[in-house]
Amino acid sequence: MRMRTVIVYKSLHHGNTKKIAEAMADACNADLVQLDERKNPGLQGYDLVGLGSGIYQSRHHPSLVAFAKKAHFSEGARAFLFSTAGIPALAGLWHRPLRGALAQQGIPIAGELCLPGYDTYAIFGLVGGINRGRPGDRELARAREFASSMVTAQGAGAQSYTSER
Ligand SMILES: Cc1cc2nc3c(=O)[nH]c(=O)nc-3n(C[C@H](O)[C@H](O)[C@H](O)COP(=O)(O)O)c2cc1C
């Protein structure tokens, strides 16, 4: 039976995560939903749920973390986490709150990916931003590869990525 996948994302700063989410959805034939707090998406019937956003003040967007805490996942569903960040090397830290929300719900995490995104926040804006032009082709290819691997991965933790290879 075909695995049903949905990707729920939030992208506010430069649309960086939106580009990644679109590439992932295309690669694994997933439904794609932009999170809107006024109308939470239903997760019933989905075997695999991708959750991603930019990293804002050291974590995913609070609305995404809140959504993960209270969403009704299907029986046996798995999740994967992704993000774009100014400093993707610290993804292990940035992903902690969202990881915790899924742990509370007992949802296994099949894998994680954090990619560099153009960042003009605060002091970085004064110097023209960091990660200019990213995500670019390289990051989009990586996102596609990752999403495809999530669909074929068996069980929790079969694939685990943080940051770039
Ligand atoms: C308010 C704000 C706070 C941010 N805080 C962090 C941070 O704590 N760590 C980090 O690595 N990047 C941080 N960034 C950079 C963003 O994570 C990065 O630009 C990301 O690609 C934005 O994704 P988006 O365009 O999908 O919103 C921050 C950006 C903004 C606007």
Image (tube, rainbow, N blue to C red):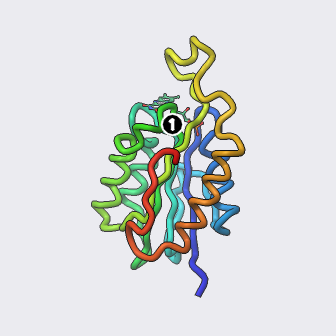
Between 75 and 50, the one nearer to me in the picture: 50
Above-or-below relation of 75 to 38: below
The residue drawn where x is 57% and y is 17% is 125
x, y (%) of residue 55? 47, 38
Q: Position of residue 137 (x, y in %)?
A: 71, 45
Query: Observer-nearest residue: 124 or 57?
Result: 124
Q: Quadrant of residue 77?
A: bottom left
User: Looking at the picture, does residue 16 appear above or below residue 105?
Assistant: above
Q: Residue at x 63, y 49 (%)?
A: 20
Q: Residue furthest front?
A: 165
Give the tally of numbered discs. Answer: 1
- Expressed as whole percent of the image width and height from the top left, the position of residue 140 reads 67, 49
Point 59% across, 32% down: residue? 13
Tell me if 121 is positioned left or right of 139 in this view. left
Q: Is mark 1 within 8 Å of ligand 1?
A: yes
Which amino acid, mark 1? Ala
Left or right, 49 with reference to 147:
left
Which image quadrant for residue 7?
bottom right
- Say which quadrant the N terminus sits in: bottom right
Q: Position of residue 133 (x, y in %)?
A: 69, 32
Say if 129 sits above or below 14 in the image. Answer: above
Residue in the picture at 46% in, 54% down:
161
Q: In the rendered image, is residue 37 in sight?
A: no
